[in-house]
Amino acid sequence: MSDTQVLLGKITALRLRLQQAQGLAHEAGSAVVSLLRDGTNPDLKPAILERQAAVVSEADWLLDDALKQLPAGAAPEPEAPAMPTQLTARARRVLERGRDLVSRLRTLAEGLDLPSASDPLAQLHRDTMAMAETTLRMVQAFPNAPSVQLRLCEGLEAILNIAAQRLGVLAHALNRRRQEMAQVDKLADLLQSLHAGRWVDAQPFLTLAESIVGEARDQAPLRLPHTEGAEPARFVACHSLAVARVIARVVRHDPELRGRPREPVLAALVHDVGMLGIPAEILTHAGPLDDAKRRAVETHPQAGAVLAQRLLPTGAWLAEAVATHHERIDGTGYPNGLRDLQLTALPRLLAVCDVYSALCEARQHRDARESRTALADTLLLAEQGALDRQACERLLQLSFYPVGSVVELADGMVACVIATPTGKRDLNTPARPVVSVLADSQGKLLPTPRFLDLAQCEGGGIVRTLTPQERNRLLGHRYPEMV
């Protein structure tokens, strides 16, 4: 027998005692009346009344105490509301639209491949599904009165409009994420096939290069892909895509290469293919490499050049760029210690973009650096004579905070960079882009974004870039595509 049944049995027994107490009280009252009529033994009146009050109080207290012991779920659950006998045409449209949204959300969930339940897209999906399902339940609880149904439909239609907007944001963000992962997977497969010695057509590489050039032409936000785990092909593919996206944005300002932007991007996609011949434990090693491991790593440019020559037999420029992307202007690079005039324009620019992208990416032994720090460190290498100064200055076109960066302003507000500075440039210009302010200094999201050209504002600018965790916590619910 369950605890609930035991307690209910006690309550039944207590109610019987209460009824008995009430009977005694009634008998006592009758006796009092009789005694008062007789006028005999008046001292009995207080005693009888006190007995009556004590019995009733004890029964009431026991009943209340038993009721307090009942668990919250002891009461029977109400039955699911039945559909009203008749719905207005407007209510039927609300019902059909709600069912359609739930169906589309369930279909979308079947294709979800999210790393965790805390992923902002997963949270957005759960919230939107809850809104749509609540709408359906409310329609089931509609009264039959047409006038009341019409009033309720106005509120439910507003809820469904918001749910539909969220569904659009969710579908767009998932589609973009899948496209980015598809690029990584495609490039990883191509590089693996090339490294394995299988015949690989150059056209898929050229098609991917053309799409990256198109992203840069359309001023798409600069996003550097990353991957979890230690799979060498995906690691190399992510870094190669990052370098390709950076070089596609800066090559437009190079007087020698801007007329053929696809070549630098193709070189970036292929430049690290020789790393697939390096043992995985070296690629994932945390900390400085010993001499043997360092020598193994330094073989990858020449190995990659052989594979690049096989991919594009008529493109000697590609094999040259792959072979020399780790050479340095001052002769301190590898594998051949080339210097200055021995390096052509493409290897110089590829080396700069390779260094900058690597600094922006997380490694086993360090976290990713802020874009401003990565740019400053790359410029410092040029100042020290290792990298080409003019090629490094091309990175200033990205500004310290590339388009798409989520940043904190000097007054504590949070904004997203939407355009890099144009016109006259000085040392402060790269730090003062055009931004869309999303949250105030207390971290409260604004009702609508506020646009701000920091180059035209007096006073403070950008303080730092937000970490992925901070972006998720602050913006994940409203702007999951920025996380």
Image (tube, grey):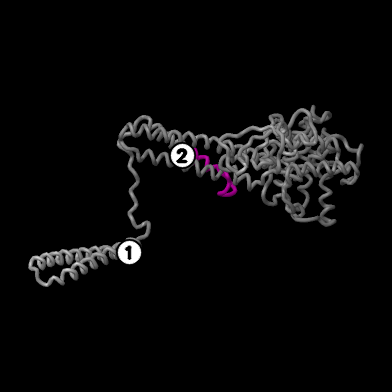
Q: Is residue 119 magenta?
A: yes
**Residue 421: where, in percent of width, then height?**
73, 32
**Residue 399: where, in percent of width, then height?**
75, 36
Which label number is shown at residue 65? 1
**Residue 373: where, in percent of width, then height?**
76, 44
Kindly indicate the quadrant of the structure image that contains residue 27: bottom left
Q: Front-most of 374 and 229?
A: 374
**Chain part drawn in magenta:** 104-120
Compared to residue 400, the image places residue 14 above or below, namely below
**Residue 112: where, in percent of width, then height?**
56, 43
In the displayed image of the protein, which residue is found farthest to the left? 38
Three-letter code for the amino acid on which mark 2 is drawn: Val
N-term-proximal mark, 1 vs 2: 1
Q: Residue at x 25, y 63 (%)?
A: 12
Compared to residue 118, the image places residue 166 above or below, namely above
Residue linked to disc 2: 102
Secondary structure beneath label 2: helix
Three-letter code for the amino acid on which mark 1 is drawn: Asp
Q: How many marks?
A: 2
